[in-house]
Image: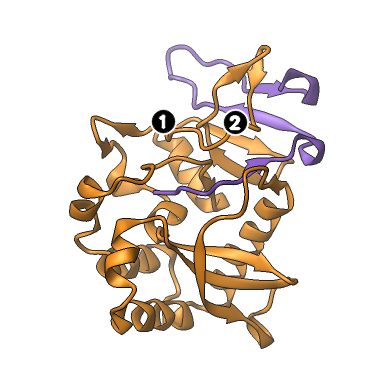
């Protein structure tokens, strides 16, 4: 059972071991789009001096946004992560869950929360045919403690409720549906 | 990493605050931003 966020970090880092080498060859965008944080991540990162954007009191993000008219441009498409420097993540050891999960992500479709694999990623393209990637991803998410999973999915749901996709949805394939007692919609 | 194509819907953002830990020698209050400041 994965009960602590740090244990989930370790599991995901093992799952995506070697992804950085693939990223060096990848022609898709790197590390862009706004980055949501769990509340406990936002507290930890804030303490380490990282600037946090708090939205609607209970949502937290990296400050990836450019300024516009004296404020933040929150409708900017795919802002570059402020920690992507010299072709590498400058906060790699403390990067948050949404970064560690990639190319895994969540999606809300037809009122159902789903675990998805983004396909605009060279690692996904190469590994998708290997059943072990899907199998190991499912194994990790099936082992997450109920309260931790609820915290993650409820945060994602709040994020998606203030989001829109003016340039179309993400390119992904569904690998699991959170249903039954794992349905937090 | 993240490459999500979402942007925020400004109609649904009711408050926005940039939080930056003050340096010990120069503490400043957090900077709340109204919706109109976005």
- Mark 1: secondary structure: loop
How packed is label 2: few (under 14 Cα within 10 Å), some, or many (20 or more)?
A: some
**Residue A26 x, y percent position in the rendering:** 27, 49
Chain B, which colour? purple
Q: Which residue is mark 1?
A: A82
Q: Residue at x 66, y 18 (%)?
A: A71
Tell me if residue A185 comes above or below residue A6 in the rendering: below
For residue A119, side relative to residue A15 (left or right):
right
Chain that bears disc 2: A
Quarter of the image with the C terminus of chain A is: bottom right
Q: Residue at x 41, y 52 (%)?
A: A99
Asked whether disc 2 touches disc 1, contact meaning CB atoms under 8 Å apart, the reply is: no
Total labels: the figure holds: 2
Q: Which quadrant of the view contains residue A177?
A: bottom right
How packed is label 1: few (under 14 Cα within 10 Å), some, or many (20 or more)?
A: some
For residue A146, side relative to residue A165 (left or right):
left
Q: Residue at x 77, y 23 (%)?
A: B34
Q: Which residue is mark 2?
A: A76
Tell me if residue A60 comes above or below residue A14 in the rendering: above
- Mark 2: secondary structure: loop
**Residue A95 x, y percent position in the rendering:** 37, 47
Give the chain letter for orange: A
Tell me if residue A43 comes above or below residue A17 in the rendering: above
**Residue A100 x, y percent position in the rendering:** 37, 57
Chain that bears disc 1: A
Q: Are marks 2 and 1 on the same chain?
A: yes
């Amino acid at each position: 059972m994965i009960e602590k966020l740090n244990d989930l970090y370790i599991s995901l880092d093992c799952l995506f071991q070697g992804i950085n080498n693939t990223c060096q060859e990848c022609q898709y965008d790197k590390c862009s789009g706004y980055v949501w944080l769990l509340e406990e991540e936002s507290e930890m990162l804030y303490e380490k001096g990282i600037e946090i954007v708090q939205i609607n009191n209970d949502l937290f993000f990296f400050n990836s946004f450019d300024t516009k008219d004296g404020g933040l441009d929150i409708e900017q498409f795919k802002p570059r992560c402020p920690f992507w420097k010299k072709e590498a993540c400058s906060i790699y050891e403390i990067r948050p869950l949404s970064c560690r999960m990639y190319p895994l992500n969540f999606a809300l479709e037809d009122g159902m929360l789903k675990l998805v694999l983004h396909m605009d990623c060279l690692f996904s393209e190469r590994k998708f045919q290997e059943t072990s990637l899907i199998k190991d991803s499912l194994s990790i998410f099936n082992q997450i403690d109920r309260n931790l999973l609820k915290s993650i999915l409820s945060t994602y749901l709040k994020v998606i409720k203030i989001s829109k996709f003016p340039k179309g949805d993400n390119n992904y394939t569904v690998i699991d549906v959170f249903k039954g007692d794992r349905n937090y919609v | 990493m993240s490459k999500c194509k979402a942007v925020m819907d400004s109609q649904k953002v009711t408050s926005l605050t940039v939080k930056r830990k003050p340096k010990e020698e120069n503490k400043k209050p957090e900077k709340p931003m109204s919706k109109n400041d976005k």
